[in-house]
Image (cartoon, rainbow, N blue to C red):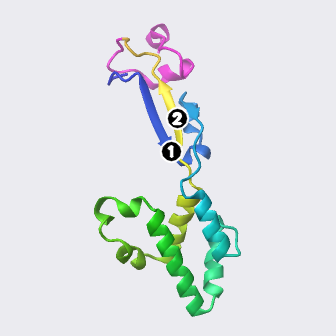
């Protein structure tokens, strides 16, 4: 590779749904469940009747609640989100705490909470088959269509392109 890396790591939450990494020759590493999976399932089970992955149903359930009950449940949702969100505890948000979270739209808070509870980052590793080999500065993109993704670059095929 241009930068001399032997191994490249990728992580993606969408890797389960769009297997771009597999198509690029990366090897899958079995993921761990989300850190908040168990507590999140308990949270949703104790506060909602709808399936915890069904954002529309939960929002409809919230809307149908009496105002006082809805406010209490929304605040519980905001507290759960802030407590379990690494995003809310980093960068310029880290000192804002509940002040920022309380100002967020409840649909956003719910969507992010579902992601925290059910999202699992998928890790992929790719080993460069050309590591240590001198390669031309530029290659036609078709050169990579003429061989397996985990095979060293066949310079003979490149010359014919």
Residues rendered magenta in the picture: 134-161
Q: Residues within 10 Å of mark 2 (few under 14, many from 20)?
A: many
Residue at 56% x, 54% y is 119
Q: Which mark is residue 123?
A: none
Looking at the image, is mark 1 or mark 2 earlier in the sequence?
A: 1
Q: Is residue 16 above or below residue 110?
A: above
Q: Quadrant of the N terminus?
A: top left
- Spatial CA span between label 1 and label 2: 8 Å
Position of residue 93 measured from the top left corner of the image (x, y, whole percent)? 32, 65
Q: Which residue is mark 1?
A: 12
Q: Residues within 10 Å of mark 1 (few under 14, many from 20)?
A: few
Residue at 48% x, 19% y is 143
* Camera-side residue of 36 and 60: 36
Residue at 41% x, 21% y is 6
Number of marks present in the image shown: 2
Q: Which residue is mark 2?
A: 124
């Amino acid at each position: 590779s241009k930068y001399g890396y032997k191994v490249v790591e990728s992580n993606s939450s969408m890797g389960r749904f769009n297997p771009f990494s597999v198509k690029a020759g990366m090897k899958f590493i079995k993921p761990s469940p989300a850190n908040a999976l168990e507590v999140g399932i308990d949270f949703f089970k104790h506060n909602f009747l709808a399936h915890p992955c069904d954002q529309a149903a939960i929002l409809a359930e919230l809307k149908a609640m009496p105002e006082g009950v809805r406010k209490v449940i929304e605040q519980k949702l905001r507290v759960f989100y802030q407590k379990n969100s690494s995003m809310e505890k980093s960068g310029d948000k880290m000192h804002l705490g509940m002040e920022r979270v309380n100002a967020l739209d409840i649909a956003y808070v719910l969507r992010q909470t579902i992601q925290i509870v059910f999202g699992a980052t998928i890790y992929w590793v790719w080993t460069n088959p050309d590591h240590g080999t001198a390669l031309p500065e530029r290659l036609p993109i078709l050169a990579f269509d003429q061989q397996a993704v985990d095979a060293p670059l066949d310079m003979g095929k490149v010359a014919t392109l």
